[in-house]
Each structure stands twice: as C-alpha cells, then as structure tokens.
Image (cartoon, rainbow, N blue to C red):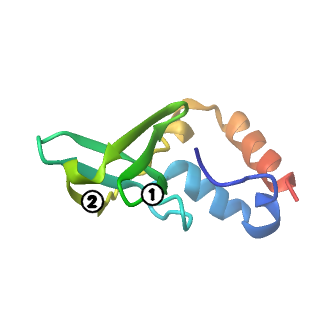
Amino acid sequence: MGPDLTRIGRVRTERDLLEAIAFPSASFVRGYEPMLLKTKNGEQSVGVILGETATHIQLAMGPGLERRVPRNEIAEITPSPVSLMPAGLDRVLTQQELADLIAFLKSLK
C-alpha cells in the first residue's frame, strides 16, 4: 500500500519519521501520492494509482481494497491533499510506544 520501509532508517532521521507519523499529509513519497478520482456519475475515490492502461486505471484505496475504473467513466483525476495513512497515530500510541516505533524504523538499514 505504501513505500518500502525496509531501509527507511538509512534515509530518514528520527525527526522525519516522527513528522511522517504525526502529519502524514505533510508530504508524500514519489509514486505514492494520493489521487482523487471523480467519475462522470459523481462517484469519488481516493487512492494511489497502481497501474494504468489505455482503457483503465487501477486504484489502491486501502489494504486489499482496489478499484479498476474504465477511463471512459472518469471525469477528473487530481492530486489529493490527504494521505491514505490515517492521521492521529501519534495520539493513539503512548510516548514509549511512539519512541519504540521510531527506534524500530530507524534501525531498518
């Protein structure tokens, strides 16, 4: 659903990791930018584009949740300012859990 984190500790500081957890919509990893897709009948979906063909767009909207939309049904595709990663994880975890999560991510080299 998101970028590969197996080496995230090599390229991001603890501050970067904390910011990404606390403010997931502040910036997006290239290739994982959320897109807002509007169909001609008024439906809207937000997700990451997994693939495109001449006739369809494949959109990932969550873990295991994908949508294949025919291009002739699409009215508009625009970048979404809101991350698919839910905001507020930093408020759900205890300070120790958050510190442990950041330490774990930082250890991934």
Marks 2 and 1 sit apart, C-alpha to C-alpha, by: 13 Å
Q: Is residue 40 left or right of residue 107?
A: left
At a point 76% along the width and 69% down the height, the residue shown is 11
Query: Which element type, helix, strand or loop, lies under badge 2?
Result: strand
- The type of residue carrying mark 2 is Ile
Quadrant that contains the N terminus: top right
In this figure, which residue is indicated by the disc labeled 1? Answer: 52
2 and 1 marks in contact (CB < 8 Å): no
Q: Residues within 10 Å of mark 2 (few under 14, many from 20)?
A: some
Q: Work out whether residue 87 can be spotted.
A: no
- Mark 2 vs mark 1, foreground winner is 1
- The type of residue carrying mark 1 is Glu
At a point 73% along the width and 48% down the height, the residue shown is 102
Q: Position of residue 32 (x, y in %)?
A: 52, 58
Q: Residue furthest front?
A: 54
Q: Position of residue 35 (x, y in %)?
A: 36, 56
Quadrant that contains the C terminus: bottom right
At a point 33% along the width and 57% down the height, the residue shown is 80
In this figure, which residue is indicated by the disc labeled 2? Answer: 77
Q: Position of residue 22 (x, y in %)?
A: 52, 49
First-in-chain label (2 vs 1): 1
Asked whether 83 or 98 is in front, the reply is 83
Query: Which element type, helix, strand or loop, lies under badge 1?
Result: strand
Q: Position of residue 68 (x, y in %)?
A: 39, 41
Asked whether 79 or 104 is in front, the reply is 79
